Image (spheres, helix red, strand yellow):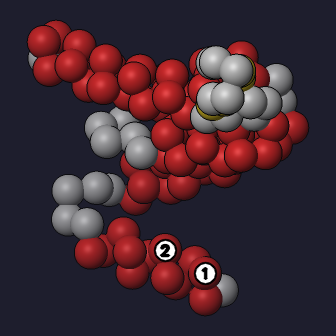
């Protein structure tokens, strides 16, 4: 009961968001986290990209990509002494800025 009360207080502090949008985003974040843990990478990528296109400032997709790479990312050998593990995070970060740029040009 206290978690619902805290979510309600958070929602009241954001004046431009109604109840349906707020709880839809919370539900989508829970689904996104479950896809990070249990679904293939391409399903997570599609969901994160759709969240970036639907909601403004969808930072959860970037954070979920960081969690995905921390759990499942394998180091990519760039040179003999240099490897890079956060490939999916980098792709999601670039897609976030690309989607934000395209959204400003379309609207």
Q: Compared to 10, does 18 lie above or below?
A: above
x 36%, y 36%: residue = 55
Left or right, 11 with respect to 101, comes to: right
The picture places residue 67, in percent across and down from the top left corner, at 66, 47
Q: Compared to 87, does 17 lie above or below?
A: below
Q: What element carries label 2?
A: helix
Q: How far apart are marks 2 and 1 (CA)?
A: 6 Å
Left or right, 11 with respect to 72, comes to: left
Q: Are marks 2 and 1 in contact (CB under 8 Å)?
A: yes
Mark 1 is surrounded, within 10 Å at the Cα level, by few (under 14), some (14 to 19) or many (20 or more) other residues, namely: few
- Judging depth in this view, the residue of 25 and 104 nearest the camera is 104
Mark drawn on residue 104: none
The picture places residue 2, in percent across and down from the top left corner, at 61, 89
Q: What element carries label 1?
A: helix
- Outermost residue, bottom direction? 2
Mark 2 is surrounded, within 10 Å at the Cα level, by few (under 14), some (14 to 19) or many (20 or more) other residues, namely: few
- Outermost residue, right direction? 38
Mark drawn on residue 3: 1
Q: Which residue in the protein does label 2 denote? A: 7
Tell me, yes or no, if residue 54 can be seen here. Answer: no
x 55%, y 33%: residue = 89
- Circle count: 2
Q: In which quarter of the image is the N terminus?
A: bottom right
The picture places residue 13, in percent across and down from the top left corner, at 27, 75
- Judging depth in this view, the residue of 83 and 52 nearest the camera is 83
x 32%, y 19%: residue = 99
- Judging depth in this view, the residue of 45 and 11 nearest the camera is 45
Q: Quadrant of the C terminus?
A: top left
Tell me, yes or no, if residue 93 can be seen here. Answer: yes
- Name the quadrant containing residue 105: top left
x 81%, y 37%: residue = 72
- Name the quadrant containing residue 31: top right
């Amino acid at each position: 009961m206290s978690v619902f009360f805290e979510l309600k207080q958070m929602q009241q502090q954001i004046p431009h968001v109604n109840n349906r949008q707020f709880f839809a985003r919370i539900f989508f974040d829970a689904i996104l986290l479950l896809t990070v843990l249990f679904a293939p990478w391409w399903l997570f990528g599609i969901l994160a990209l759709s969240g970036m296109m639907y909601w403004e400032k969808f930072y959860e997709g970037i954070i979920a990509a960081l969690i995905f790479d921390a759990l499942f990312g394998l180091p990519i050998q760039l040179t003999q002494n240099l490897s890079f593990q956060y490939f999916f995070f980098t792709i999601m970060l670039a897609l976030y800025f690309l989607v934000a740029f395209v959204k400003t040009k379309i609207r």
